[in-house]
Amino acid sequence: MLPFILRLPEKPVWPILRKAIYRAVIVTCCAITGCTPETSAEAFQDVPVLTGYLLPGSRASVTIERKQPFNEDAVLSDEQIDSLSVTLYVDGIPYPLYSIGGGVYSDTSDAVVLEAGQLFSLQFQFNGKEVTAETTILNKPSGFTQSVTTLAVESFSAGGGPGSGGGLPNIPDPVTLSWNNDDRTYYLVVVENIESNPTLIKDTTGQADRPQRVFRNEPTQGNEYEINAMAFEYYGRHRIILYHLNPDYAALYNDSGSSSQNLTTPVSNVVNGLGIFTGINADTLILRVVKP
Amino acid sequence: MNRTLAFLAVFFALIFYAQSQNLSQIYLDGLYIGPFARTLGEISEKHRVTFSYAPALIESFRTDDRPFKKPLDEQLNSWCKRYKLRWYQGQDGVVYLIDRFATPEMDIPTATLNANGIVEPTQFNLTISGKVVDRQNGEVLPYASVRVVGGAIGTVTNASGFFTLLNILADTTTLEASFLGYAKTRFRLQPGMEFSTLKIDLKPSEYSLSEVVISAEKEELLKTGSELGVVQMTPRKLADLPSIGEKDIMRAFQLLPGISAANEGSSGLYVRGGTPDQNLILYDGFTIYHVDHLYGFFSAFNSNGIKDVQLYKGGFESRFGGRLSSVMEITGKDGNAKGFNIGGDISLLSVNAYAELPIGDKFTSLIAFRRSYKGPLYNKIFDQYNTTETTSQPGGGGGPTGFNLQSKVTSYFYDLNGKFTYRLNKNDAISLSIFNGTDKLDNGTKIETPSFLASQGINFNFEITDLTRYGNVGVGLKWTRKWSDRLFGTTVLSYSQYYSLRDRTNEGTISTDGSDSETFKFGTIEENNLLDYSLKSDYSFQLSSQHKLGFGVFGTYYDIAYTYSQNDTSTILDRQDQGLLAGVYLQDHIKLADGRIKIAPGVRVNYYEPTGKLYTEPRLSANIQFTPKIKLSGSWGRFYQFANRVTREDILSGSRDFWILSDGDQIPVSYATHYMAGLQYENSDFLMSVEGYYKDIVGLSEYSLRFNASFQGVNYEENFYSGIGYAKGLEFLLQKKSGKLSGWVSYTLAQTRSKYDVYGVDYFPANQDVTHEFKFTSLYKWRDWSFSSTWVYATGRPYTAPEGGYSLTLLDGTTSDYFSVGAKNGLRLNDYHRLDIAATRTLNHPTRNAELGSISFSIFNLYNRRNDWYKEYQIVNSDIVENSKTYLGITPNVTLTLKIR
């Protein structure tokens, strides 16, 4: 009727069992107490911050800095920022980078020729850890064209219209840039006035600072970019650089955490470190901004 | 003689069997010099008189008497006068010594003993069953011990207070029943009794502080029921412990080893490295998901409505499931079966009232209700949490009138416990249990147009909402049936809802004459709603006196929703998950070697519909009683959890939790494997125990917005991260159980680590990790006063903080600033320590010689230690500003408790 009913043993194997179990208890307690010693509150994580852009035709160079602690009492490691032993591996072949001061390490012997398609690996020791970062240089942008090479923009002042007349200036059509991007990789357009002493388009009398010569954009995965004519601040030649980027660089444009509601951790491709070490490639066009 | 003295000092009053004697015909002759207890022992041996008393009552008295042919009753009168005691002789012939204010009552039911002596047995090898009840109010007592005196047979009553014993030698056997907080009582079977409906009455012990409130499950002489890591508590004596403002069962458990006490901001239990959501809380069979009142400073369980609490610290049986860590089983009071009663408490924080109404002999009911009022203590706790101050701003532009600030703070909490029981017949009972705990914490402010602007045709109003509402509502309908002397079943149909709303938004409209008004709203809204519909049936079948089988089926339908939105329009997370969890379990209890070895293998099989998989949980626990005083226990098992409370990491303003259902994908089904062992030594006065545990945990989940998956539109669903972890530790307990001074010292050495790939390759301390925890609890009884103190020391808990920043030069020559967060939980808060004291005076009825209630004075955090709670950070002009939140400083409280019966 019942699945089974246990019968009591006639004579319990008590003494033997008791001894065996005592031993097991002692072994178990020792095993449990053998905890690894608890490290107390960890100190400031002294890690290096890298800025390294590898561009074909340029000298291989990286900048190494320290992360700045919020707490003034934070204890930094003994590492000297200009005394590190930094090695750049190009397709597995090591090349030393030499300190030229200010945390900059450079291939002063020009032994490295940076080219697209190479695999780069940076390596050095910092605060007892091996800091590494890997990247490659993508292809030079192809099919990079501009809709116009010269753009005529009327000058105007904040109080009046263009020239001596009134009203708003005639705004020319935007400059359209385009390039090939079938694989939807990341590109960044940087526009920079390259005149030595450029003339302002807008009269900014009374303003403390002159406007920036460079205007900043964000990376795009598209194949086209429009520069609004009103975005130009100066007359003269402008260099339009189209950078072909790895996703690591594009990630720098994430929300950097300056919101009061979130504190986001910046993305970095540096192992045991922070910052960016990335290969880039570029093509450049020239645009003239002139008075009509 | 020494053995006699040792025996006299047992935990409760001790009783020798004796025939009734006329004390006036017993003459004392000789020297009686020495401790009173020894004197009584000598008299007992010489004249075969049995004395019963609480050892603590007489331990400080010495006799120095030389009676010459003096009748014993006269000598007792003389001693009682001298020591302010009272004596009486029960119908069983036992002489009871009690406090002079105590009520003399018979300590053994009249039905149990034939006063004229030995009765010849008429039946042999019996099966008996019945229940153990409180003599004063008729409440059945769950998990009370019942055993055969001098034999190996024994058991523990189930949650409904029923027990069954097989293979009882004869119908004249004497049983002994005991229950925490009650005097141990003997019950003699007599021929002709109804052996299937026995009722053993236990009397609440008269001397509360001769025993401790909390006692590890222990059986010095019993041979059943003992399990590793099981703690039992009765709320009856809770008032003797210091508290923030309320008698709190959760806070009392936190004084034990392995349960963290350093979390004033959470009433939930952190058991052996587990989190409160990993602790299953069953209230009369249904699950409670949230236990916090007033930011967690105390729990939503009203001790006036609770009869018994069992805590299984790990390795629990297969009848429990769905949690990784531990189980807390709460049994609500049925209500007084003997008459109408009302009572209540009032403290600086709340008003608490209960009523018990029996109708006939089949229906009992109890309703307990507690509500806060905005007294000084409530405000103190509320302000501790809310640093937002509503200060009046001076009017601008030299205007005569300031901004019109209206604070609309309306905060309160309440809870309601109810239980209605109807006994259909001697085998069936139906009970309906209700639990409702609700908190509303509103710290909002409204700013209206000042008159100097209104006169210029500008109107605006600005409303700062800071609202937190949460609560748990549960209802359970329970049917208990005794199918036979061997088979007992319980079926519970239940519904439980947990809801939480946090609305921290700022909303406003602005309008000028002749223009449209503009409305704006920003801030965060977080809403969590959990519904649990359950049906389960549990059965226990007594196969033989050495073999009991438990089995059951269960099913729960979960419906859990969570939404988190910022700025009114952007919903970060919106999850609506439903799923069915169903299964069966089998639990065996086997006794070997005259009950000295107990093995309890079990298995629980779950089917979880969202993943479509079966999850099998094997369990095994065993204990071995080496000697009557030394016991070794061990357990192992696999434990799955399907509904988890996930931490939403928020470094700036403190992390929060929300309940969510595992989907087997982004939120995996988590599981733990427990390995536990313990060694216990217990004699009549002391208990010493060492327990060790190791838990391996897989499938932990955490939500964080720290890591954005892509810079072109974040998919917030991807911000769930899973990890693994482990917890290990050693717990030491030394307890003094008897005497005027009692209490315990506990120490826990523990390590809880987690590892999430997103936080790095190494294990890091889990949020709840506390390395050292030392707790000291002492209780002292002096006449009608009881004094107590608790001191807690714990290593500070870990936290994560922003630690630095850096700038990068981008390709366009501009720079971008970044903040760097330190190692996950790489820092620790300052160590936590706190001393609380309390003094409670029992109030006696002026005419009825009965207890009327008590008045309790307590001081929480006596030396005003500013313990860390958590850190908040603000980003101000690219700098990080740290703000430390601290727990309560010194906080006195007074509680008055009254009852009519």
Image: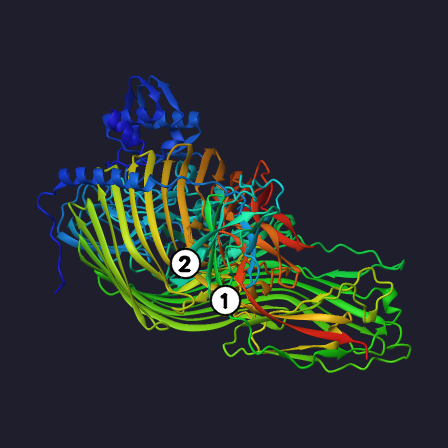
Question: Can residue B805 be seen in this snapshot?
Answer: yes
Q: Which mark is residue B723?
A: 2
Q: Is residue A151 left or right of residue B71?
A: right
- Residue situated in front as seen by the camera: B551 or B77: B551
- State which quadrant residue B192 falls in: bottom left
Q: Secondary structure at mark 1?
A: loop
Vertical relation: B1 (above or below) B417: above
Q: Residue A198 in the image: x percent, y percent?
A: 79, 66
Q: Residue A61 in the image: x percent, y percent?
A: 56, 55
Q: Which mark is residue A116?
A: 1
Q: Is residue A3 left or right of residue B830?
A: left
- Residue situated in front as seen by the camera: B871 or B527: B871
Q: Closer to us: mark 2 or mark 1?
A: 1
Which amino acid is tagged 2? Gly
How many residues crowd mark 2 within 10 Å: few (<14), some (14–19), many (20+)?
some
How many residues crowd mark 1 within 10 Å: few (<14), some (14–19), many (20+)?
some
Q: Chain of mark 1?
A: A
Q: Residue B21 in the image: x percent, y percent?
A: 26, 33
Question: Can residue B26 be seen in this snapshot?
Answer: no
Q: Is residue B405 left or right of residue B751?
A: right
Q: Residue A54 in the image: x percent, y percent?
A: 54, 60
Which residue in the rendered view is the most extreme toward the left? A10
Which amino acid is tagged 1? Ala
Q: Quadrant of the N terminus of chain B?
A: top left
Q: CA distance from mark 2 to mark 1?
A: 39 Å
Q: Is residue B694 left or right of residue A40?
A: left
Q: Secondary structure at mark 2?
A: strand
- Residue situated in front as seen by the camera: B344 or B496: B496
Q: Chain of mark 2?
A: B
Vertical relation: B627 (above or below) B248: above
Determine whether label 2 and label 1 are within 8 Å by CB.
no
Vertical relation: B667 (above or below) B387: below
